[in-house]
Amino acid sequence: MSAIDEILEANRAFAKSFEPGPARAPRVAVVLCMDARIDPIRALGLPYGTANIIRTAGGRVVDALRSLSVSQAVLGSSEVAIVHHTECGMATMDDAGMRAKLDERGLAAPEGFVFHTFRDLEQSLHEDVAVYRASAMVRQDVPVRTFVYDVATGALREVA
């Protein structure tokens, strides 16, 4: 059975007992990595309908600006949490390494495309706040806080 067929089977079971929660406006937009080891609903204790979860490779804000602007302007979120994590694959290579991975699979990125890899977790969070603060697409009057999630322990640590 394919992975997508397994998803469909699991969804059929889920839908049989599904009961939607109350409609709510999201209070927070959470930008975090797409790493499958992170279950943001459970890890962050997010009640149904209270957060917009925006996942990107490495949890990079530059890739999330469009979704953040919709979250704030249309859906009404009024806080932002940026979450990077330990053992992130985006911290294990640079743009040249990513291009090599694509080449191995017969794929290619456009000339000058930037993958936003990084080496230092805390520095990448500071860079993401700077990208956020430089954007006219997102609200500048809301709290933006940054965190590192430890994939080995499940603990979240705030980065000032």
Image (cartoon, grey):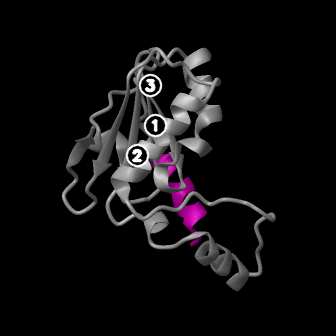
Q: Could you tell me the amino acid type at mark 1?
A: Val
Q: Indicate the quadrant where residue 30 lies.
A: top left
Dot 1 or dot 3: first in sequence order is 3
What SS does tag 2 mark? helix
User: Which residue carries the number 3 mark?
Assistant: 20
Give residue 81's mark.
none
Q: Could you tell me the amino acid type at mark 2?
A: Leu
Determine if residue 15 is in view. no
Query: Picture coordinates of residue 24 (x, y %)?
Result: 44, 14
Determine if residue 155 is in view. yes
**Closer to us: 2 or 72:** 72
Picture quarter with the N terminus:
bottom right
Task: Report the span colored magenta.
Answer: 1-13
Q: CA distance from mark 2 to mark 1?
A: 6 Å
Picture quarter with the C terminus:
top left
Q: Could you tell me the amino acid type at mark 3?
A: Pro
Q: CA distance from mark 3 to mark 2?
A: 34 Å
Left or right: 15 in relation to 41: right
Query: Picture coordinates of residue 46 (x, y %)?
Result: 32, 31
User: Which residue carries the number 2 mark?
Assistant: 125
Query: Picture coordinates of residue 3 (x, y %)?
Result: 55, 66
Label 3 Cα crowd, 10 Å radius (few <14 / some 14-19 / many 20+): few
User: Which residue carries the number 1 mark?
Assistant: 129
Q: Indicate the quadrant where residue 134 lies.
A: top right
Left or right: 150 in relation to 83: left
What SS does tag 3 mark? loop
Would residue 5 be counted in the magenta stretch? yes
Q: Main secondary structure of the magenta part?
A: helix
Dot 3 or dot 2: first in sequence order is 3
Asked if 124 appears above or below 93 in the picture, the reply is: above
Left or right: 127 in relation to 2: left
Would residue 74 be counted in the magenta stretch? no
